[in-house]
Amino acid sequence: MQPSGVITITTDFGHKGPFTAVMKGVIVGRFPEAKIIDLIHDIPAQWPPEAGFWVSRAYKYFPSGTVHVAIVDPGVGTERDILLVQHDRHYFLAPDNGLLSPILDDADDTHVFKLDLSCFRRLGLDEPSATFHGRDIFAPIAADIASGRTNPVSVGIPTYEWIPGWVDDPDVSTGKVSGVIITVDTFGNLISNIDRKLIEGFRQPVVTVAGHEFPMKTTYGRVQPGEYLALINSFDVIEVARAEGNAAEGLGLERGAPIVISDGIPT
């Protein structure tokens, strides 16, 4: 696979401090032609499932050969492994803590490696610090893969074992799908982990969350301001929203809340 020279970065670093900028400095120091794109940096601290959700939903909008770096790493500096994954003509680099489970669960065309720490000297890397692997490991490895200087086969050890995701996949039964709210966006929309394909056979889907039932609509403007609705959002998952309002605040819900979609007209 030919690298594209594009690197995306996803973290829970937020926007205070120089951490993300320092990673970018390391990247361009090793690969000046790198095209670095910030995917998201306000992932809730130490919550890998949301990072994995966004990476798995966003990567397909980038060129083949893009390197996607995702760092939400409560175990930094411990014995946890670092995964390098080739999937669907993209590269992924993240701690082995369940973050990449949405990618790894799709086993087709997926090759998984654990980073071989003995490659550091060969790549001219110093001994990494115990608390900033984003700068000392992820950034230089991503730069070298994106530049074509190395690849997962050269710096990784093939593996078929990794830490499972922290959030269970949706439970699917006849006429019913149960999942969770995986994230809440800036507008207070409650975004679930239920993909549209799981309800394609439903004739009249009804969304239930916190004891409230909401009809499915096509977009926010199909209800009056202040009313609640459910829809399939632009990333093809079920979302509960409030027109011109904040559904999370109005319903008193946050990530992790259960959500159920049932078919109002069973076959």
Image (cartoon, rainbow, N blue to C red):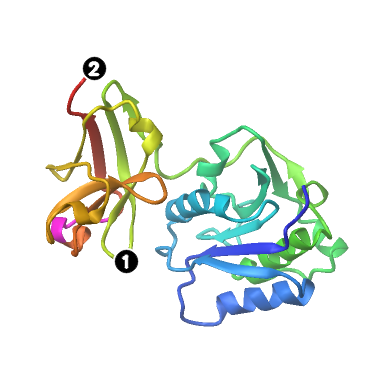
Residue 267's disc is: 2
Residue at x-position 59% and y-position 68%: 37
Specify the amino acid type for callout 1.
Thr
Q: Is residue 215 left or right of residue 128?
A: left
Figure quadrant of residue 129: bottom right
Q: Which element type, helix, strand or loop, lies under badge 1? A: loop
State which tag comes first along the sequence, 1 or 2.
1
Q: Which element type, helix, strand or loop, lies under badge 2? A: loop
Residue at x-position 35% and y-position 50%: 233
In which quadrant of the rendered image does the C terminus lie? top left
Judge by depth and name the residue closer to the eye, 195 or 9: 195
Residue 253's disc is: none
Q: Is residue 126 above or below residue 120?
A: below
Q: CA distance from mark 1 to mark 2?
A: 37 Å
Question: Pointer 1: what residue?
Answer: 186
Q: Is residue 253 above or below residue 178?
A: below
Q: Can you give x and y, in whole percent of width and height, for residue 206 in the image?
A: 19, 36
Q: Can you give x and y, in whole percent of width and height, for residue 83 in the image?
A: 65, 49
Q: Is residue 110 left or right of residue 259?
A: right
* Residue 130 appears in the rendering: no
Residue at x-position 57% and y-position 75%: 20
